[in-house]
Image (cartoon, helix red, strand yellow):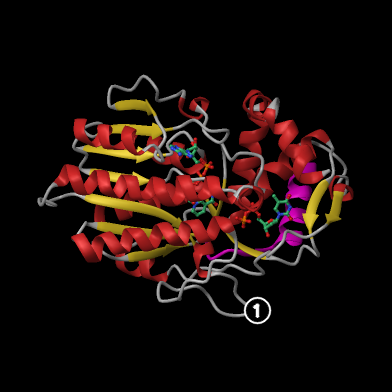
Amino acid sequence: MKILITGGAGFIGSHVVRRFVNAYPSYDIYNLDALTYAGNLGNLSDIEKAPNYHFMKGDIADQKFIDHLFDEYVFDKVIHLAAESHVDRSIKDPMSFVKTNVMGTVNLLNGCKNSWGKDYTNKLFYHISTDEVYGSLGEDGLFTEENSYDPRSPYSASKASSDHFVRAYHETYGLPVVITNCSNNYGPNHFPEKLIPLFINNIIKENPLPVYGDGKYTRDWLYVLDHAAAIDTVAHNGKIGETYNIGGFNEWRNIDLVRLLCDLMDEKLSRKRGTSQKLITFIKDRPGHDKRYAIDASKIAGELGWKPSVTFEEGLRLTIDWYLSNPAWLENVTSGNYLEYYKKMYS
Ligand code: NAD
Ligand code: TYD
């Protein structure tokens, strides 16, 4: 079994690659990643010498490169995670999201279609997507797989577009596909541009914690290793042509989450309770900020038997412990370009 995992040097991808390399020694795992600012081979140093692990540097938006790759290899499964993934960056530079998330996905679909010919036996194109394609919820209700799409940021619009292409290739060419739409992930190796790792880094350094707007926006949080387990389940048992929503059954308003994080960090850093909460600073809101995301994950739970394994507090504690034990990782990703990024976004 040859499995191509795209974006395997990123946050979620690295946990998926590690899980597959360790759990399935008989599979050959090919990690294709362009190593953008978000890709970091340091995320995989523990498995880089495994005999069933192979790294390939390349850009999925480069059509010639992808065509050539699929001429050379016939992959049994493609698990596609490579993407530009940060909403705030998509507001500043939408086109790079179109290139990677839309064109990159279509290049991979064409690669599969051409290299598989008419024989799709035991083949799979598995597209990893987000709950953000469904838009924004009011006070009540949950996103189900039946929700219509209503993306509202350039990021979610590009992911929605890629989902549509994946379904179109299934309907038009019969390509064996499956899609999962997951809620917000958190955990080790998360690049500190997203809420939780950015705030952990700022708390360590005693820098302000920039909460957008009134902080009453709601997200549903899932521990990244639980997402990797869900991806394993769907890659092996998901039904072709289906969509599965993945979520943590774990909704938090940003401000409540930030206060909990501050208290846990004070405890871990032996600071007086309340110290880190003083860093909370309300700043100008994100344009088009989606009010609430919440996932109904009962389909994957009922049909495939997956459910999250840790509570939010357990997951947050594991996450904080990881960041405090890996200062070199954090230092490496927060020097250089990161400082310019931070200035551009927050000053
Ligand atoms: P990430 O930004 O941490 O990692 C993305 C990876 O893709 C990086 O390693 C980067 O180098 C690589 N990449 C980017 N452009 C590329 C290109 N053109 N060619 C090849 N590689 C490229 O992202 P993540 O948070 O790990 O998200 C992974 C996937 O999961 C994405 O598709 C994202 O939309 C989806 N997702 C993320 C979340 C979340 O909370 N992070 C939730 C639901 C779905
Ligand atoms: P983020 O981690 O960027 O994920 P997403 O926008 O994809 O849900 O943001 C999570 C929530 O936290 C979102 O409501 C925006 C908010 N947020 C802040 O208040 N301040 C910040 O500095 C960041 C990065 C996010």
Residues rendered magenta in the picture:
248-267
Residue 160 among magenta residues = no
10 Å crowding of disc 1: few (<14), some (14-19), many (20+)? few
Q: Position of residue 95 (x, y in %)?
A: 55, 48
Q: Residue placed at 20% from the left, 42% from the top? A: 76
Q: Which residue is mark 1?
A: 139
Q: Amino acid at mark 1?
A: Glu
Can residue 150 be seen here? The reply is: yes
Magenta part, dominant SS = helix
- Element type at mark 1: loop
Residue 191, image x and y in percent?
61, 39
297, above or below 194, in the image? below
Numbered-mark total = 1
Of all residues, the one furthest to the bottom in this rendering is 140
Is residue 44 rendered to the left or right of residue 217?
left
Taking 129 as reference, is 241 left or right? Answer: left
Judge by depth and name the residue closer to the eye, 103 or 142: 103
Measured along the vertical axis of the image, is residue 103 above or below residue 201? below
Q: Position of residue 93 (x, y in %)?
A: 62, 47
